[in-house]
Each structure stands twice: as C-alpha cells, then as structure tokens.
Image (cartoon, helix red, strand yellow):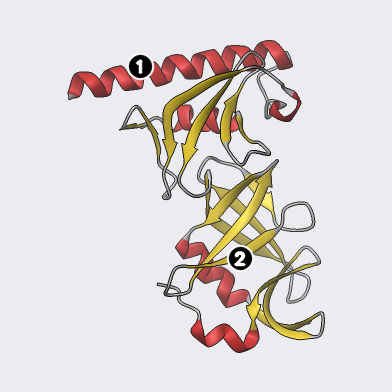
Amino acid sequence: MATEEISGQADAAGLAALISRASEESSGKKRGLPPVERWNPPFCGDIDMEIRADGTWFYMGTPIGRPALVRLFSTVLRKDEDEKTYLVTPVEKVGIRVADAPFIAVEVSVTGGQGQQVLTFRTNVGDVVEAGGEHRLRFAIAGGNAELKPYLHVRGRLEALVSRAVMYELVALGEILDVEGRAMFAIRSAGEVFPVMPADELDALSYE
C-alpha cells in the first residue's frame, strides 16, 4: 500500500511538471493564470483524478497531499460546454471527475456598510474572488431536507461551493428585499442583489 501511495504521488508530480512546463512555454512567463480558455488541444482521454465534494483532490485513489500540486492543477482546470471538467495544456486535454464543485470557498471578508457591502471570498486553492456582476452567487436547495448550497462563480464555467462555515456568515448578512415584485431573502455584494429564496419559504430552510 505504501508503495502504491508513493507511486501515485510520483505520477501526480510528473503530471504537474508536464503541465508547468507546457504552461510556461505557452505564456512565456511563470506568473498569473494560464489562458486555458484560448487553448484547443486534442482530447487525450480521462485520467484517474477526482475532486471530491469536500474539495480534496485524489489521483489514482490517493489524496494529493501537496498543496502546491493541487494549486498547479487548479490553474489549468476548464469546464467545457459538455459539462465535463478537464485539465488543459497547450498540447493535451484530459478529463477528470468532479463530485460537486472544483473549488471550495473557505473564507469571506465583508467591506462597506449595509447596502454598499462587498463580499470577497478566498478559495481552498488560493483564488480571491469578489462577488458581483462578473462573479455571481447562486443558491441551490438540495436534498429532501432542503439543504442550502451556495455557489460562487470563479472563472470560465468553474464554481466554488461555499463551505458550511462561510454559508452561515452569508445567511447572517441576508435581507428581505423586493425582487421583481416578490419578497425575497437575498444577499447584496458590489451593487448586485443575489436572491436566495422567497421570503415565505425561509422557515423551511435547513442549514444542517
């Protein structure tokens, strides 16, 4: 088992090195996000990589324990029109599995006063995203117990699932607002209003 784990980590490191080299050759620099939306490489099949619902990355059944590797992989993620998620370099595109969202929003900071507030999120892979017109919040109600699941648009078609702790902070910031003639429980950020649910359904919401 230990040998399998070492092998899996080595293979993941090798894949990361390939991605790093290809990205640097394409962009000519080592800083910033690679322009994956502009790349159109051939599809080279699926690999045994998965992002689980809690944001943990697995390769060949083994957790990727090095944050630097996870961060590197995250910079070349792309979700295409087929709703599948890929690792993309200038020379190849490989499919991976994503259980829910590829990122987790693990922290939020609030600036500005009521009505003028701006919510800025940090993801588990280091992205800093300000919720607003370009990065919208959406809210899903999942499961038979009406569990609230907020999502934040990060880039392209990629989203971050807002962690439970951060979700509690969001709910505390919610207001009852008129949205297209209906009273809605909603959250504001950067001048935008993000409806969560009709105000009369709020009592049925589960945070568990």
**Which residue is found at the position 42% from the left and 75% from the top?**
145
Q: Is residue 27 left or right of residue 148?
A: right
Q: Is residue 39 above or below residue 107?
A: above
Name the quadrant of the N terminus: top left
- Amino acid, disc 2: Phe
The residue singled out by tag 2 in the image is: 139
Crowdedness of circle 1 by 10 Å Cα count: few (<14), some, many (20+)? few
Where does residue 5 sit, x and y in percent of width and height?
26, 24
Residue 22 in the image: state x and y as whole percent: 62, 13
Q: Position of residue 24 (x, y in %)?
A: 65, 14
144 on left or right of 199 = left
Q: Element at badge 2?
A: strand
Circle 1 residue: 10
Please provide percent x and percent y for residue 55.
44, 45
For mark 1, give the secondary structure.
Answer: helix
Q: Which of the 4 quarters of the picture holds residue 57?
A: top left
Q: Residue at left 72%, top 53%?
A: 135
Q: Quarter holding the C terminus? A: bottom left
Q: Is residue 41 left or right of residue 193?
A: left
